Amino acid sequence: MILVNAANGQQGKLLVPKLLAQGHELRACVRSERSAAELRDAGLADVVVGDISQPDIIERAIRGVDKVYHVCPGINPREREIGLAWIDAAKAEGVEHFVFSSVLHAILTDLVQHEIKRDIEEYLVSSGLEYTILQPTIYMAPRRFTRIFETGVLRAGWSLDRHQSLVDIGDVTDVAAAVLGDSERHAGATYELVGAGRYTAHDMGAIIAKVFGKPITVEEIGPDAYLKGLFGDHDLSTMPHEAAVGRSLTERYSSHDFIGNPNVLTWLLGRPPTSFEQFVASHHAAMTAAASG
């Protein structure tokens, strides 16, 4: 049996159907009954509902599981603690294969989330478990396109001239499904998951404009506006971890490029990774169809 954490999140929404289609016995762990209902409607009967930081939820979710796909909900102040606890539980349960969704360049300790994931990686490698570590770069984000399409503006919280490598979440979950389906082949591996191309915000704006067939303005909005976009009007003094994560991103991405190499992802997929233009075109077509339907 395979367990998928955060199974109704960005990765889980795509990964769960792929694993079900491949015929795997599957259990999901989600935080809310609403998420559980969505998964049950999609054909997954075995769903554990609760906070994955709680020992009783970990115990219920991992009981009888052979493989774990661990991805922590985004910007969680307890992410390090959660990751270590799940590794301990997997070891105690005798899990055969622990797959951890980490991040590209986890060694960059000036990025708060990267330092946390680096610590989890180290703990996993030293645990004695069979493991695979996936290190995706920045996701191509479909939820941004509706706003860009409506406003004609692409806003970035960091320097518009810095280059970034991107990856399609669909490609990431294709790899995750393949890794979980063939543990023997992928055990002990750490894979950087990076799409082709290196893009500045200006490059991305030009591609979106080409696909949308309309001018797109690119704006640098600065860290405060970026944080407000992430967290709304919440008082950030009550969210010190979340604020630190956001500010570390804006500072790093304004002072350094964030790039990787697509060779590993190309090999794992057996095809070229999805390009940013292909990704934008696909989501533009979906938005257009939804609007006309």
Image (tube, helix red, strand yellow):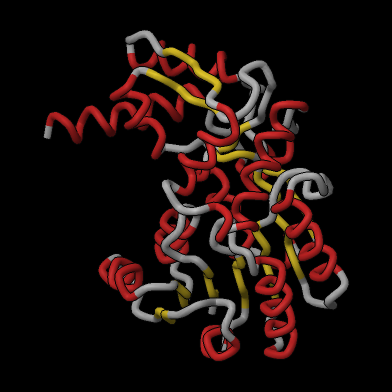
* Front-lying residue, 88 or 231: 231
- Which residue, as the protein is rendered here, is positioned at the far right? 126
What residue is shown at x 63% (from left), y 64% (from top)? 77
Q: How many marks?
A: 0
Q: Position of residue 222 (x, y in %)?
A: 58, 28
Most foreground residue, 37 or 201: 201
- In the rendered image, the vertical position of residue 233 relative to residue 30, given as above or below: above
- x, y percent for residue 50: 45, 80
Image coordinates for residue 249, horizontal then vertical, percent: 67, 39
From this viewpoint, which residue is outermost toward the left? 293
Q: Quadrant of the C terminus?
A: top left
Specify the quadrant of the image occupied by residue 237: bottom right
Eyeballing the image, is 10 above or below 292?
below
Quarter of the image with the N terminus is: bottom right
Q: Position of residue 259 (x, y in %)?
A: 73, 30
Q: State left or right for residue 42 relative to residue 265.
A: left
Q: Quadrant of residue 132?
A: bottom right
Q: Nearer the viewer, residue 181 or 237?
A: 237
* Viewer can see residue 117: yes
Q: Residue at x 39, y 39 (%)?
A: 143
